[in-house]
Image (cartoon, rainbow, N blue to C red):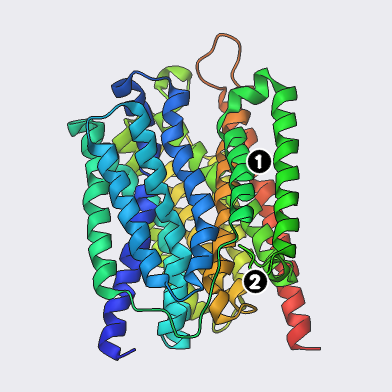
Amino acid sequence: MARSEARLLVPALMFIALVVAAVGSLGTPLITSVATSFHVSLGSAQWTLTVALLSGAVATPVLGRLGAGPHRRAAILATLAVVVAGSALTVLPLPFAWLLAGRAAQGVGLGLTALMMGVARDHLPEERSAAVIALISVVSIIGAGVGYPLAALLAEFGGVRAAYGLGLVVTAAALLTAWRSMPEAPEGRSAHVDVAGAVVLAAALLLVLFLAGERTLWSRHLALAAGLAVVAVVLLCVWAVIELRSTTPLVDVRAVRHPAVAGANLAMFVGGIGMYLLLTLITRYAQTPHGAGYGFGLTTFVAGLILIPFSVLGFVAGKLTPRVRTRIADPLLLAGSAVVVGGGFALFAAARSDLAELFAAMGVLGFGVGGFSAAMPGVILAVTPKSETSSAMSFNYVVRSVGYSLGSAIGGLILAAGTGPGHLFPDDSAYTTAALIGIGAMAITTLTSLALARRRSSETNP
């Protein structure tokens, strides 16, 4: 690409990645408002978030495969058109079912992050592309921190439709940006979508995210929940067999089995559980009324402001990581970032009586998540051909989505278990228990990352 075109491409990639991440997370701060406005239960309103995660998890590997082919530009534009149409459905005065349909369409955009990485790797110089890919990964995380307070503020003053209107405006801008800046894929590429694999994966992920979202199912119908979990595992095994036998797999499972890729995905899965667990704990703690004996009783908007340190320090870590990578290997950066997130858990467990301490814990979490997200692509792409960039990273983002969903569910289950009979809110000690479990998750993530570093060291220094 010409240098001027490359300069325009980089901010376009960042903007699109930020928009799809922010719009995909719009459901989080609006759950209570949706329940009130549409006269549905909180459990039903929760699906405005779950359905976006589900459609994103299903669309991500499909788009990743399309991104490896000759029609990547068309796939990006078509996906953003779907997101814009979904955004329009969330704004129009239609029944609740149409809102869910709109949120599902918005969630499809979450699959574009991996395609943005593929574009960067194909059309930018190697050193430049590595730094841009790292920032795209970070932006896809901190987008939630950008969208949360803005959506909460609009909902507070203009209602749910106004908040979703923000999504319509920015997604339309993203579509225009992509139309003006996205280049065609390099010649000689080909890609076919494995429809059977996509259907089986969709069914498996539907069960996984349903079980993660329906927390009461585990407490009231444990046998049914366990049975559905077994079915989900069986479906994932069937999907793996389909992919191994397919000549055009949705995800190259053989490549995923590479020790570096498998280890990175395991670290992403366990680390994702821990990262989203702490995010859930802090925001819920901040909104707990004083009458519970702890908490700060913050409104949705003010609680959203706690995410500002998360976003700012996450972006700082993302900018610093490419420079640090010249001296420290990516797996070691993963391990160090996991330790930082563990430090955020320790800080929350030991000190949360002052609002400033919650801001500090959120900032530590953001810095750790930013570093982790920026280093992750380097681990996977070091053993991945250019043509498979989108597909390889799309699988990693599916793993991340499932990890985040489980992190949220685990937090809910721990706090529910710590809620006494007749009480509306859990005991303060339940938050400490959840934080200690989070420290354990980040310890596993650290050990996995160190094992990756040891393996890379042995390969480069036989």
Residue at the spot of label 1: 436
Query: CB atoms at circles 1 and 2 under 8 Å apart?
Result: no
**Residue type for callout 2:** Pro
Residue 309 in view (yes/no): no
Report crowding for label 2: few under 14, some 14 to 19, many 20 or more residues within 10 A (C-alpha).
many
Q: Residue at x 46, y 33 (%)?
A: 47
Q: Residue at x 58, y 76 (%)?
A: 381
Residue at the spot of label 2: 331
Quadrant of the snapshot with the N terminus: bottom left
Q: Residue at x 66, y 18 (%)?
A: 220
Residue 334 located left or right of residue 75: right
Residue 33 horizontal/vertical position (percent): 32, 27
> In terms of secondary structure, where does tag 1 sit?
helix
- State which quadrant residue 334 falls in: bottom right
Residue 142 horizontal/vertical position (percent): 40, 56
Residue 173 horizontal/vertical position (percent): 22, 59
Check the image and name the residue furthest to the bottom: 2
- State which quadrant residue 399 falls in: bottom right
Q: Residue at x 64, y 71 (%)?
A: 332
Report crowding for label 1: few under 14, some 14 to 19, many 20 or more residues within 10 A (C-alpha).
some
Q: Toward the viewer: 345 or 64?
A: 64
Residue 305 horizontal/vertical position (percent): 32, 44
**Residue type for callout 1:** Leu
